[in-house]
Image (cartoon, rainbow, N blue to C red):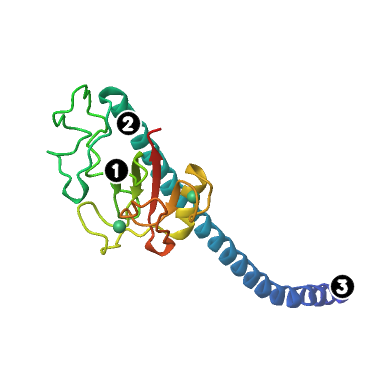
Amino acid sequence: MKYKTYNKLFKTNRQKPKKAFTLIELLVVIAIIGILASVVVVNVGSAREKAKVGKAVSDMKEIDTVVNMFLNDTGVYPGDCGLLCTAANDPFINNLGVSGWSGPYISGGIYSKNHSWGGHLGYYNGIDPGGNAYYLLYLDDDPAGTDSTNNTGVIPLSALIAIDKVLDDGILSSGRARAGEEGDHSNEGRYNATIGEIVIRNYID
Ligand SMILES: [Ca+2]
Ligand SMILES: [Ca+2]
């Protein structure tokens, strides 16, 4: 009897603090789950962003490659159709009277090529004031066919920098890749990181 009472007491004494600890432990577990969940959300977010950057970079590299294939075949750059590009006048999928043309060079053409942030990929060619032929590839913050005031496809600054890092020097204000708008055709450039798009300049020579 005496032993039983001791045992009862012993059990009660052990259980009481354990109940209190269980509550604290529960709170700790909830807190840890919360922290882990936020880490997972951040990781999933950055993995998604990485995938978008990877897709944008590979699309730009693809266009860069086919522009040079076009040049090799025809001796000239593809023309650019700007805001008026359609399936009918896209130079990458239509032979618009260019001799040596052996496309299509881009499946589906460039006119409908969008990037993952809601804007589109673009191409422009021109001659700079020094007489050098060049072309621009850009990830526009506007959907295809719209002007430069739409901005529904703005690319986050961190993604612009990540793209610049792969294609150029990782600095948005210098090198051949810069944050700016596609209207940036002058030699000196019009750097503007707040626009949310990136322009890559390439020279023929
Ligand atoms: Ca734009
Ligand atoms: Ca750069």
| Residue 126, disc | 1
Dot 1 crowding, Cα within 10 Å, few <14, some 14–19, many 20+: some
* Dot 1 amino acid type: Gly
Along the viewing direction, whichever of 8 and 39 lies nearer the viewer: 39
Looking at the image, the residue that sits furthest to the front is: 130
Q: Residue at x 29, y 46 (%)?
A: 122
Q: Residue at x 29, y 43 (%)?
A: 126
**Closer to the camera in the image, 23 or 164:** 164
Identify the residue at image location x=14%, y=39%.
89
Question: For mark 3, what is the residue?
Answer: 3
Q: Quadrant of ligand 1?
A: bottom left
Image-based side of 77 in relation to 177, left or right:
left
- Residue 118: percent from left, percent from top: 30, 55
At label 2, which amino acid type do we have?
Val
Q: In x, y percent, where is residue 182?
A: 32, 53
The mark lying in front, picked from 3 and 2, is 2
In this rendering, position of residue 119 left or right of residue 95: right
Q: Quadrant of residue 21?
A: bottom right
Report crowding for label 3: few under 14, some 14 to 19, many 20 or more residues within 10 A (C-alpha).
few
